[in-house]
Amino acid sequence: MNQEIRLRLKHVIIFASIIAFLFFYSLSSNRDCDSEQSRSNYGDEPWPVGQGRDAFLPNRKGPTIYAVTPTYSRPVQKAELTRLSHIIRLVPNVFWVIVEDAAQTSTLVSNLLKRSGLQDRSVQLFAKTPTNFKLQGKDPNWLKPRGVEQRNEALKWIRNHLKHDAMGNGGAELSQSLVYFMDDDNTYSTELFDEISKIEKGKVGVWPVGLVGGLMVEKPVLNRDGLVLGFNSAWKPERPFPLDMAGFAISSDLLLDNPQAQFSYEVERGYQESEILRHLTIAHDMQPLANQCKDVLVWHTRTEAPKLDAEKSLQKSGKKSNDGMEV
């Protein structure tokens, strides 16, 4: 009898132990699920300002930024546009205006827009540079103005596009939008577009540009009140606006109000920025951005021309290493 009681007691203890184990295991699993759910939900929330990845997240609800990129056929064209497309994909309020220096649009650029998923927020234009303004042979890239025809074509498209939108809205005031000249050989931080989004109507925003004009940085010089006094340019500082194309963006209402504002073949080297800006603003009225012009968010980097001597030799024999391939 006593042996039977001890046996039943042993079974009860074993059963209770199993129940207790299952209970605590269930609690532990729920905690893991809750933790995983918490991590998943946290990933959907912005990080505290100035911390972690939020420092690099662009303004996803900002005004439309029309990013104008002149481009032309060359060995590094696809590589440079691919790099640029990755930046633009990260900034949803950017609309990409690509203008090719050609008599028609190219399949290469069309394919790139398709593969990057940017067809719905881009336009592919073309405008051929007149022969007498084209660089020849071993001409240095500074000898003749570049991108004039293409940037003017982009400005024409943007103005017409904005006017069409205004007509579609019954003449109502258009929402804020901005224009930035985004060359394909520069390096851009996504933070820059968050800064561009802060530009007010009727303003031209300005900020520093790294590695340009023989300096580590070219930047606007501000007074104690935060107004732009001038620029620290070392190259042709006598220019009305001695800054780089990558160092400013324009509120689109200024371009609509000043249709004469565009680029020109008639100005001397280095004066393209001044040529368009002289119609739109004065230095004191520019809006300084990027932490009162203390942060560098764009760099005037250039891609080294690839050495293709072996390829040229191959082509002389009627062959190509990239035969049937888009490089």
Image (spheres, rainbow, N blue to C red):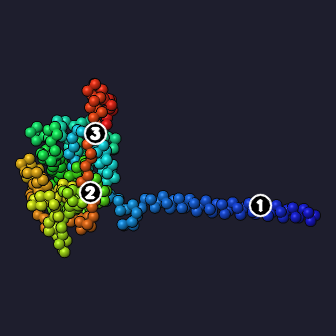
Q: Nearer the viewer, residue 309 or 234?
A: 309
Q: Position of residue 276 (x, y in %)?
A: 11, 54
Q: Give residue 216's quadrant in the image.
A: bottom left
**Quadrant where the C terminus is found in the figure:** top left
Which circle's residue, 2 or 1, is located before the other in the chain? 1
Question: Residue at the location (79% across, 64% down)?
Answer: 13
Residue under pointer 2: 298
Q: Position of residue 213 (x, y in %)?
A: 18, 56
Q: Quadrant of residue 100?
A: top left
Q: Closer to us: mark 2 or mark 1?
A: 2
Is the residue marked by circle 1 packed among few (<14), some (14-19), or many (20+) residues within 10 Å? few
Q: Are marks 1 and 3 in contact (CB under 8 Å)?
A: no
Q: Is residue 172 left or right of residue 91?
A: left
| Residue at image location 19% in from the left, 71% down from the top | 226
- Residue 190 in the figure: left or right of residue 44: left
- How many residues crowd mark 2 within 10 Å: few (<14), some (14–19), many (20+)? many
Most extreme residue toward the bottom is 224
Q: Position of residue 182 (x, y in %)?
A: 23, 51
Q: Residue at x 87, y 64 (%)?
A: 6
- For image coordinates 17% across by 72% down, the residue present is 223
Of 96 and 188, nearer the camera is 188
Q: Which residue is mark 1?
A: 15
Question: Amino acid under label 3?
Answer: Lys
Residue 12 shows in this picture? yes
Name the secondary structure under disc 1: helix
Instruction: Decide which of 292, 179 is in the foreground and name it.
Output: 292
Q: Which sits earlier in the primary sequence, circle 2 or circle 3?
A: 2
The CA span between labels 2 and 3 is 27 Å
Q: Which residue in the protein does label 3 denote?
A: 307
| Amino acid under disc 2 | Val
